[in-house]
Image (tube, helix red, strand yellow):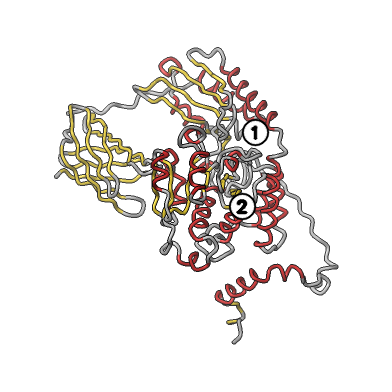
Amino acid sequence: MSSLRNGKWSRREVLKQSGILSALGAASAAAPVAASAAGLADKAVSKHTLVHEGDIRDNLFTRIGVRPMINGRGTYTIISGSCSLPEVKQAMYDASFYFVHLDEMMNGIGAQLAELTGAEWGITTTGCAAAICLATIACIAGTDVEKCQALPYTKKKDQVIIPKHSRNPYDIGVRMSGVEVVEVGTPEEFREKLSDRTAMVYILSGPDSTSGPMSISVLCAMAKEKNIPVFVDAAAEEPIKPNIHLAAGASLVGYSGGKCMRGPQSSGMMIGNKNLCKAAYYQAAPHHCYGRALKCSKEEAMGLLAAVRQWYKRDHAAEQAQWKAWMQHIADRLKGIPAVTAEVIPPQQDLSNRCSTLRIRWDATKVGITGTELAARLDEGTPRITLLGAQGSRPDKMESSIGVTSYMMEAGEEKIIADALYEALTKPGSHPNPPAPTGPLASVQGTWAVTVEYLRGTGEQKFVLNQKEGEVSGEHHGEIYNAPFHGTVQGDQIELHSVMPVAGNPLYCNFKGTVTGNNMAGTVNMGEYGEAKWSAVRG
């Protein structure tokens, strides 16, 4: 039967052909079609030049209603991470002109990453979060095709051990494979939980894992006794050579490509044991395994490789000196403003986000603007500026502060930030206190049936509230998680705050609403998860 239907390949036939290509990739590379036979030899190669069009006020983003910002906050994914290096942009651009066999490309990249980092091997991934997922399923199934195809349901190794100090929002990369997470708090508990069911140990690199009884080296030594791989999440760290985590006994180490290395934002790197690295790539696109969705394009892969190459060429001491000078320039600009102090904070010993920062503090009762008001003013300004950790709000939290991070700033932006801060702190404008609710104090004591209307979906919850005049305490019963409440009532306005104990990723819920007898309603702010409407009826 013909493979063509109505002149088109069926998806089934394409899949069959992709399998054949994977198996015969080396052979096809060894016997290429002659360029002259394809009529290409006489064609001139087009020359292309990258041109940066636009500026901070008029660019491809502003033309779709998006306002770019000057980044004095750092490498946060929500504000698009880092600014890629020129060499990265060039590599991604150049890669876009060629078709390559991805298995061959990854082998070439693997050898290069090994040479650059000193590890046995390496692969590119779509961020460090993808590396966590791919490492987990590689440790579960290896390259056993039947076990790969059975995921996430059938697996002999169905547990991953995570020290309690390593729980974090990114260990979703472990959990998404359907394994049971086993938390441990002591070396004795760690040793006890190691078993034939343990696929991997996941450790988040940081101050709690660099020394002491639960350090990476101690846990790696115990895991090695059972031949259990250890993955270290070093996403934001500098990939120094020789690699400290591999030297401590780790099997695999994951890095973000879009942070200090300034590669493609959606890229990552995993280095370590060659067989495990290759098994992790086996689980990802272009192969039809559990990690098929984690596709790393040729552009991202070659951009990441360019970033790693540049990392080992960059003058890091000069970069640190420049960043410190930028922070000092801003501090000097703010000198002499009454009730304002600016302190340059040197880089910390931690390898993550290592750069000079600036902490600015002031008394808003004297200066006339709070930290949150200043942050909003900078965000609304032209050019738009984002800074770090604004504190201070009206009417009762007037001690204010804000931070500046030098990590992702560009030359000249220190002057823009300094001038904007000086203007805001010396000409604050008018910021009256928000009107305080008046009228009789509402009663909220009791048990309330609560409905939360999310953007899509409805949650049924329960509030159990105790009231002592304007102070409120109690219990927040969610659909899955429970947490203590604290809050206030002023007139008919209520505010309630809870922290749902989601492992590694606490969920902050801030309810505001109006009380009307046995009913109340309002909005709940959940930070990065946005807002939802809620209503409640007292039982």
Q: Is residue 212 left or right of residue 44?
A: left
Relative vertical location of residue 438 with respect to residue 102 in this rendering, above or below:
above
Q: What is the CA distance from the residue labelled 2 to the residue labelled 1?
A: 27 Å
For label 2, the crowd category at 10 Å Cα-Cα, with few meaning under 14, some 14 to 19 and many 20 or more, is many
SS at badge 1: loop
Dot label at residue 86: none
Relative vertical location of residue 486 with respect to residue 35 in this rendering, above or below:
above
Q: Is residue 204 left or right of residue 436?
A: right
SS at badge 2: strand
Percent across and percent down for residue 96 are 69, 57
Relative vertical location of residue 416 with respect to residue 4 in this rendering, above or below:
above
Give the camera-side residue of 517 and 20.
Answer: 20
Give the camera-side residue of 352 and 338.
Answer: 352
For label 1, the crowd category at 10 Å Cα-Cα, with few meaning under 14, some 14 to 19 and many 20 or more, is some
N-term-proximal mark, 2 vs 1: 2
Percent across and percent down for residue 154 are 42, 64
Give the camera-side residue of 284 and 63.
Answer: 284
Q: Which residue is mark 2?
A: 124
Q: Residue furthest front?
A: 225
Q: Residue at x 56, y 26 (%)?
A: 357
Q: Residue at x 57, y 65 (%)?
A: 287
Amino acid under label 1? Answer: Glu
Amino acid under label 2? Answer: Thr
Q: Which part of the image, by quadrant, shows the C terminus?
A: top left
Asked whether residue 222 is in view, the answer is yes
Q: Residue furthest bottom?
A: 1
Q: Which residue is mark 1?
A: 410
User: Of tags 2 and 1, which is closer to the observer?
Assistant: 2
Percent across and percent down for residue 2 are 61, 85
Asked whether residue 53 is in view, the answer is no
Percent across and percent down for residue 166 are 45, 40
